[in-house]
Amino acid sequence: MKIAIVEDERLFRDVLRNACTTDLGHEVVGEAGTGAEALRLVPAALPDLLVLDIHLPDMDGLEVLGALRRKRALLRTLILSSYFDEYTLCRIEQAAVQGFIDKSTNTVAELSAALGAIESGSTYFPSVYTEARRAHSHNPVAFDKLLTAREQTVLGLVGEPLSDAEIAVHLNLSPETVEKHRFNIMRKLGLRSRAESARFARRCGLTPPPVAPRLRSAAK
């Protein structure tokens, strides 16, 4: 297959390229380290498969995928992520991608299995993913079954943590409306305080994990 890789960690991108080409015999037709680069690269490279990290420094990876699919609806995609939480699971499901690889636990052998499955027209999701999906589907109080899309957004911002006034500015709402959303969220999820709401948002992945600062080269 012709593969495009969108991954911001240069070392891991090199590992992916070598695994795809030297180990597995595919052709890497382009690489990008940011969402903006991906939006330029992928339409020009016309890959058979996009290997895409969710967490990019400038854009959300799944938002990048949405923009690319508006130009090329049938773009096959293998998602990479260092984080696998309930919210990530829901977003991957909604994106209807062909596979998922957990960067923190999977191996080159898993990558080979994923590429082989996708090349043959199938999909690839590891057992941890399918087990989590099964548990989520049978959970009647999963957050996405109880909260509206707006309430999920508000809860994610509570986890930042932002005040009601700051959330109101961010979403162009009144503070009173934000407060109403927040109390509805707490009632639906059985949460008792703002701090407990923030912890719930981080635990489920509604609030993205903090980005570790990049190391800078020492000045010579």
Image (cartoon, rainbow, N blue to C red):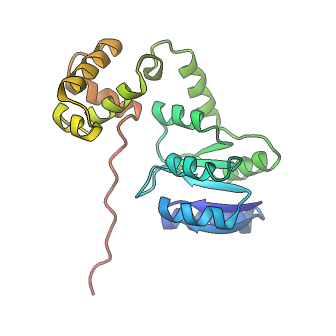
Q: What residue is at 28 percent from the left and 21 percent from the top?
A: 181
Q: Answer above or below: position of 162 versus 142.
A: below
Q: Nearer the viewer, residue 142 or 46?
A: 46
Tell whether 89 sits left or right of 58.
Answer: right
Q: Nearer the viewer, residue 130 or 54?
A: 54
Q: What residue is at 28 percent from the left and 79 percent from the top?
A: 218
Q: What residue is at 19 percent from the left and 31 percent from the top?
A: 164
Q: Answer above or below: position of 32 versus 167.
A: below
Image quadrant holding the N terminus, namely bottom right
Residue 163 % position (x, y): 17, 34
Report which quarter residue 29 is drawn in.
Answer: bottom right
Tell whether 55 sits left or right of 174.
Answer: right
Tell whether 214 sits left or right of 14.
Answer: left
Image quadrant holding the C terminus, namely bottom left
Q: Nearer the viewer, residue 70 or 182?
A: 70
Q: How many marks?
A: 0
Would you say residue 116 is visible in this rendering? yes
Q: Residue furthest bottom?
A: 220
Residue 87 % position (x, y): 46, 33
Report which quarter residue 93 is drawn in.
Answer: top right
Report which quarter residue 146 is drawn in.
Answer: top left
Would you say residue 34 is visible in this rendering? no
Residue 103 % position (x, y): 54, 50
